[in-house]
Image: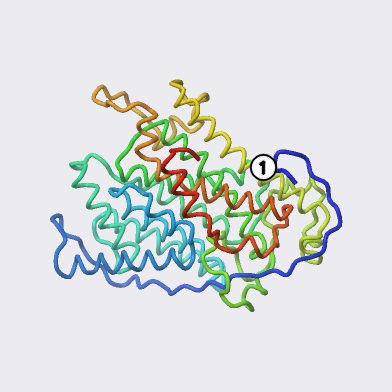
Amino acid sequence: MSITKAITRPCRSNYQIRHVYLSHKQPIPQQRRHLSSGPLTGAAKAEVQSAHKYCLNLLSKYDRPSYTLSTFIPRPAQQTYLALRALNATLSLIPDTTSSYTIGLMRLQFWRDAISKTLAGSPPKEPIAILLASAIEDLHHRSNGSARLSRNWLNRMISAREQTLTNDPYPNLEALEGYAESTYSTLLYLTLGALPMTSVTADHVASHVGKAAGIAAVLRGLPIVAFPQQVQQQTQAQAGSGVQIGGTRQGAVMLPLDVMAQAGVKEEEVFRQGADAPGLRDAVFTVATRASDHLITVQQMLSNLRAGGDVGHDFEHEGEEGHQYAADATRHESPLDEVNRAFGIFMPAVATRLWLDRLESVDFDIFNPELLRSDWKLPWKAYMAFQRKSI
């Protein structure tokens, strides 16, 4: 079945679902620390090194694609990348590791407070906050104080996660795209800011890559959100899938309501029949097609830039907070040069494309256990894409 063609619904046998049980230690918010304004030495340096190791290990366990792709991130942004991706993984774990909505809200509030203190130079004694504070300090020195990470973008990531605590369905496909923009696209904007880079073209590419990655993450997590009690009974046999985690209290089918209605999908039939629920593969196909469309758009944008033109269409978020671009006569890079310099930051597009190809290969059976496995081809595919500067 092709992701570019309409699909039919033949009768197929059901598949056994393999789930990932994820656990995470509660952070310790009581203690505070302050990083000096000079080079890190002694205990502070050791603390940052320990935090760096912690974030790497966290990604290795819970977001293997981001762990693999970290090697392609430009060196000035690597600390920021690791801290942000570790934060993203931690936030995604909250619904599945808290016993109530109220506790989930408290955990998210801890991270809001932690971000505020970290940006103020007094991070809590928590590894992600420590590494992020070190990255912020480094960015300050490299840019002579002219560049900083956006507090609003960091808080937007947390607020977007808050909306998913109760597993309320997305009303339509556009709402799902908005969630992806507020989480995965925002991760890329923040990482670009750590280079530092302020570029409408780079942000435009990042927006499409992030939307594709975010939509795919929601699809990957659909079986886990739909059958949370089965998740609790499974061992962590398929760690590192980078899935979008849901709650453990009550199952939900996290597909846009308009797509489900169009395909004739009923939530109770998904709970009873799994992959054989009428219309489910059609609905998954529709959502996956939207993610694929964003990647195709990125490919066309890169092709247009290499041909000496512009990207071909306007950036829909230009002019919004964080996306204002003043003319700078001292800048000497072309839009293509900017994209090429930041290309490693766009590598999640490669992991997303590989996963969408695997979804297509199993005929859009979102419950197929193959979809939760790490892709052994990712390192090689990522290397080739990075060398060619092509998604």
Image location (x, y in percent) of residue 88: 45, 58
Q: Which residue is outermost to the right?
A: 11
Q: Is residue 342 left or right of residue 254?
A: left
The residue sitting at 51% across, 47% down in the picture is 350
The residue sitting at 57% across, 38% down in the picture is 294
Q: Is residue 251 left or right of residue 139?
A: right
Nearest the camera: 373 or 157?
373
Image location (x, y in percent) of residue 370: 65, 63
Query: How many marks are shown on the rendered structure?
Result: 1
Q: Relative to residue 86, is residue 189 depicted above or below?
A: above
Q: Is residue 277 left or right of residue 55?
A: right
Nearest the camera: 205 or 343?
343
Which quarter of the picture shows residue 82?
A: bottom left
Nearest the camera: 221 or 114?
221
Which quarter of the picture shows residue 250?
A: bottom right
Q: Relative to residue 325, is residue 248 depicted above or below?
A: below
The residue sitting at 81% across, 60% down in the picture is 276
Q: Relative to residue 203, is residue 237 depicted above or below?
A: below
Mark 1: amino acid = Thr
The residue where tag 1 is placed is 289
